[in-house]
Image (tube, grey):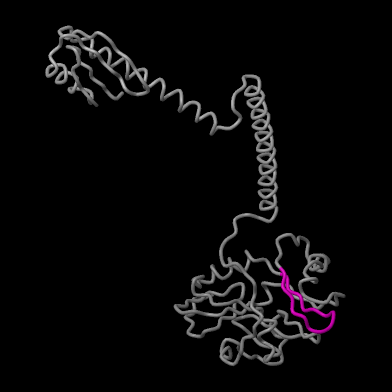
């Protein structure tokens, strides 16, 4: 089959079509790519009918697991049903030379070619049966040799587009179901682990609460933090007081007679000491609140 340059907006795709296009096109699928039958199904709508499609095609097809289905409601309880393999159509379009990005929509020839009861495309013949089903037939059977490719511009496309994925699905239905089953199994395992973790945490919380009660500890973290903060302040004050006293005792030239602490105020009493020199020494590190001399004693107050 030679490569044909196509300028039409529609392409009738056969299994051996080879074509070159550089613009957007709509594809009409030859009956080679799908199976179609009319069924009487006692349901009200297509959604309900979908549930029985696999069963309806089992008598003509060996494997229905990879099939996709579509239907058109013709009358009360009467449906025109299509079965097709998505991957097969995808591969045919790709192998024909059509860039997948240039495909607008895909249609079944069954619905689009009714204006031509019999016709030829390339070297293949097609006709509508008495049941109004389009089929491929051997060459030479047709009474008229209408070349459909020359008459595509007469076709007004319907709204019945093929629901097809124009990308390669490397996984079969069985593989997809297996992956879903494994994912579900992992989800159950993770849920079980989370449940166990929550139980463990709950038991641990109960043990902590029990230990608090035994040790007469406060029940809330706010109370615990308050106690910690209180004793931390006391500890910090004690450390600061020791640092101040250590600093004051380092200078032996001053005679420190007495030290007293009231809240955060440290009172120092020096005997026979030079007020200016003592203040100068203390001010190097600490802030003096007050300083006075009484009866040769120097009283200095420092804020811790």
| Placement of the N terminus among the 4 image quadrants | bottom right
* Residue lying at 85% horizontally and 77% vertically, measured from the top left: 40
Q: Please check the rendered image and state whether residue 115 is part of the magenta-colored stretch, yes or no.
A: no
* Left or right position of 277 against 244: left
Q: How many marks?
A: 0
Residue 20 x %, y % = 47, 76
Q: Quadrant of the C terminus?
A: top left
Residue 70 lies in the magenta stretch: yes
Q: Is residue 169 above or below residue 209?
A: below
Residue 83 spot, x, y in % from top left: 73, 70
Residue depicted at 66% across the width and 78% down the height: 108
- The answer to which image quadrant residue 165 occupies is bottom right
Quarter holding residue 240: top left
**Can you give x and y, in whole percent of width and height, for residue 166 in the image?**
57, 67
Query: Residue 257 location, x and y as percent?
Result: 25, 8
Residue at the right extreme, as displayed: 42
| Residue name at image x 69 percent, y 56 percent | 173
- Left or right: 99, with 297 as reference point: right
Magenta segment range?
A: 69-83
């Amino acid at each position: 089959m030679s490569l044909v340059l196509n300028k039409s907006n529609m392409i009738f795709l056969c299994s051996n079509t080879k074509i070159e296009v550089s613009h957007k096109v709509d594809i009409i699928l030859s009956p080679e790519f799908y199976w179609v039958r009319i069924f009487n199904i006692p349901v009200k709508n297509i959604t309900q009918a979908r549930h029985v499609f696999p069963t309806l095609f089992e008598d003509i097809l060996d494997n229905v697991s990879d099939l996709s289905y579509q239907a058109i409601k013709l009358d009360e309880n009467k449906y025109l049903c299509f079965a097709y393999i998505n991957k097969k159509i995808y591969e045919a379009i790709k192998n024909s030379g059509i860039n997948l990005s240039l495909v607008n929509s895909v249609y079944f020839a069954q619905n689009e070619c009714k204006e031509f009861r019999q016709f030829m495309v390339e070297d293949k013949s097609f006709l509508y049966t008495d049941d109004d089903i389009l089929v491929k037939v051997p060459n030479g059977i047709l009474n008229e040799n209408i070349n459909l490719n020359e008459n595509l511009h007469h076709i007004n496309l319907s709204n019945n587009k093929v629901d097809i994925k124009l990308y390669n699905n490397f996984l079969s239905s069985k593989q997809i179901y297996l992956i879903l089953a494994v994912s579900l199994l992992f989800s159950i395992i993770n849920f079980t682990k989370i449940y166990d973790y929550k139980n463990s945490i709950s038991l641990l919380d109960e043990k902590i609460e029990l230990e608090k009660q035994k040790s007469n500890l406060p029940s809330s973290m706010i109370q615990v933090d308050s106690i910690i903060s209180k004793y931390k302040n006391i500890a910090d004050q004690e450390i600061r007081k020791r640092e101040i006293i250590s600093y004051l005792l380092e200078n032996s030239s001053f005679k420190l007679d007495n030290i007293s602490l009231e809240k955060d105020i440290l009172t120092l009493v020096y005997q026979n000491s030079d007020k200016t020199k003592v203040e100068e020494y203390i001010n190097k590190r600490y802030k003096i609140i007050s300083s006075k001399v009484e009866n040769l004693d120097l009283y200095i107050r420092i804020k811790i």
